[in-house]
Image: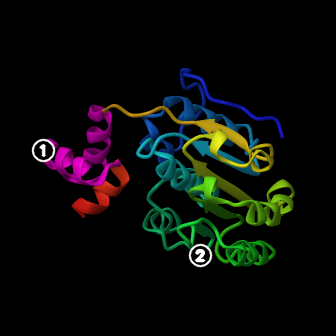
Amino acid sequence: MTQESTHTMQNTYPLPQALTRLQDQPQVQNLLARALHEHKLAHAYLFVGAPGSGKGLAAKALAQCVLCAQGGDAACDDCIRISRGTHPDVHVLTPASANGYLIEQIRQLIADVSLAPMRSTHKIYVIDRADLLRENSANALLKTIEEPPADTIFILSARSSSAVLPTIVSRCQVVAFRTLTDAAAKAAIMREISATEQEARIALAATGTPGRAVEFLQ
């Protein structure tokens, strides 16, 4: 698959409500809006960027746009379930071991991929810390990522593409996230939850990323 890194650009495509939350990453916002508008979504993405740059938020937003019958209105039952992490067709994987993903995790994922979606027309698999896919786990996953069912999209995330095995990178469309300034990170927290600037600053200092800061304040 041809890889594509993002560049700063003016948004020229219809913007689903779910993608408006990515205003701190306009290049990512525009890339996803374009892919949705042109019906050219990749079957596998690799989101790369520093912790707190919004990769998890973007994964949820893309899932909302794909699974929502209104194209990502961010308000329907499907969108709410995705936001809360309870949608049966959105699967988020994290390493089960401090040393990385276990081969059994990947085998279970592969088995699940063959099953039909439960609520929607597609299934989304979000693989956090793809840099912790060791060689045996990565090799087990390769063919599934390269040729998944038409109703399946993979979203992997990592600090950088260089930290991920090249065989995995080569099968994904790479999307780069810029590092947020402290001001942008605090603003992102305040948009997500009713918090003062001081509360956002303290939570960010305590947790390190906007996403974890929001969870901390909640």
How packed is label 1: few (under 14 Cα within 10 Å), some, or many (20 or more)? few
Q: Give the label on residue 157, or none.
A: none
The residue identified by callout 1 is 198
Q: Looking at the picture, tell me which residue is in the foreground, 68 or 105.
A: 105
Magenta-drawn stretch contains 188? yes
Query: Looking at the picture, which amino acid does disc 1 mark?
Result: Gln
Q: Residue at x 81, y 66 (%)?
A: 140
Most distant residue in the top direction: 9
Q: Quarter-wise, where is residue 179 in the image?
A: top left
Identified at 12% across, 44% down, the residue is 198
**x then y, percent, for residue 162:** 66, 39
Is the N terminus in the top left, top right, bottom left or bottom right quadrant?
top right
Does the image show residue 214? yes
Instruction: Determine whether the residue tagged by mark 1 lies in a helix, strand or loop.
Output: helix
Colour scheme of the rendered structure: rainbow
Q: Indicate which disc, 1 or 2, sits on the residue closer to the N terminus.
A: 2
Location of residue 57 with respect to 87 vertically, above or below: above
Q: Is residue 97 left or right of residue 186?
A: right
For numbered disc 2, what is the local secondary structure? loop
- Nearest the camera: 20 or 2? 2
Q: Is residue 101 above or below residue 191?
A: below
State the residue in front, 136 or 115. Answer: 136
Q: Which residue is mark 2?
A: 88
- Magenta range: 182-209
* Residue 206 on image: x %, y %: 23, 53
Tag 2: residue type? Pro
